[in-house]
Image (cartoon, rainbow, N blue to C red):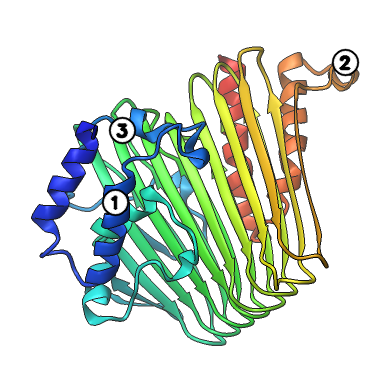
Amino acid sequence: MRTPAETALIERFEREKSSLPGAKDARAAAFARFEKAGLPGRRVESYHYTDIRNLMRSVAPEVPVEGELIHSQHVGVEGIPVVTFANGRLQSASGMIGAAKLEQLDAALLAGAAELGTALGAANDAIVDINTAFASKGAFISVPAGEKASLHLAFVDHHDSAFAVHSRVVVSVGAGAEVLLYESHEGPDNLPYQANKVVELLISEGAKVQHIRLNISGNKALALSTLAASLGADAELMSLGFTSGAETSRHQVFITYAGENAKLDLRGTTMIRGRQHADTTLVVDHAVPHGESRELFKTVVDGEAQGVFQGKIIVRPHAQKTDGQMASNALLLSDEAGMSNKPELEIFADDVVCAHGATCGALDENQLFYLMARGLPRADAEALLVEAFLDEALDAVTHEGLREALAERVHVWLSARKVA
């Protein structure tokens, strides 16, 4: 039996499919998959810990923005040009920002300049399928071969009643180019809203991308986000996601190796409290030989919050000489806090070096005693240990301003904990 949300999505697609911009075949195929599978619930293994079918009982309307929205000052980073998306729609006109060319997504799809799903590889996901079916707001960004570019994609969600946001950003990085891409996601507190956002990175041969994602969505939000990246030969991607917002969040990452000798450094930092639920799910698909991947995720859970990490490294039969290492570490700051860790390896080749590990525990009382014996109040001692726990993941950020901005988000979270 279909849920009201599933019925509403099916009816909406029937109404709108003829007017959606471009990518007709991709949209139809994606929606056919969704219509067959429905919203993912606990019976779907990858959604066992985050039951979207139950969480999304109804579908909120998408609403336009009147006037201009501006990102909060505390998410801006000096020296990185800002591109603002208001409820998913690119506010600026198409044009150049440094070496990067920006186009409205709908115009790029109609012109055939952009495609949907190229970076997803073999990934199959109902939430992404919904996004693909309805995608019209967002941007197509291209950086030519050999160029350098920095961009801050500021997603600002706002309305005075329940609403929904679907957005898609497709980024094409030319051979040998170097790109710094910073995403920030924010929205109103105390207002339920639904967000389904996808970023696709098409990284060509020898290109280098550093991607930072900050989620400080509103405290009643259902925030669903996806990063899909395709790595060409000798390409390098460092991606770090920082999550402290939303009532329920799920950030999923799909990485496909399309060329040999590509390198991936995938990191995550999650800080949640109260009754928040944060799910990080990733699939790293080594489809060619000589690939290297490193995954390191740190989660701090307080109150009655629940953290989830699901990570899978796949090594295809012909992907010899793959080197993949995955680790998930969680720190529980209360007796009621919970964490579900599920790292996996699927290896179909015999000449590989792969490993995974997961830890979950409380702060070390001996370390706390040492710090408190030297005059630190317990709250300050705990904060110092939490910061040290997270540093290993955050150290991968080489841009000084971004590193400071993320350190400030850690400080803000810990300061609120002291007050509470």
Q: Report the mark closest to the observer, 2 or 3.
A: 3
Q: Which mark is residue 384?
A: none
Q: In 3D space, how far apart are the residues under numbered discs 2 and 3 (Cα atoms)?
A: 45 Å
Residue 15 horizontal/vertical position (percent):
8, 54
Position of 164 relative to 211 (above/below): above
Q: In 3D space, how far apart are the residues under numbered discs 3 and 1 (Cα atoms)?
A: 14 Å
The numbered mark, 3 or 1, whose residue comes first in the sequence reads 3
* Mark 2, residue position: 369
Q: Amino acid at mark 1?
A: His
Residue 271 horizontal/vertical position (percent):
59, 32
In this view of the protein, can residue 275 be seen by the observer? yes
Q: In 3D space, how far apart are the residues under numbered discs 1 and 2 (Cα atoms)?
A: 48 Å
* Mark 1, residue position: 166
Q: Residue at x 26, y 41 (%)?
A: 158
The numbered mark, 2 or 3, whose residue comes first in the sequence reads 3
Question: Are there few (<14), some (14-19), or many (20+) residues within 10 Å of tag 2?
Answer: few
| Nearest to the observer: residue 260 or residue 244 | 260
Residue 394 horizontal/vertical position (percent):
69, 48
* Mark 3, residue position: 56
Q: Is residue 261 left or right of residue 163?
A: right
Label 3 secondary element: loop
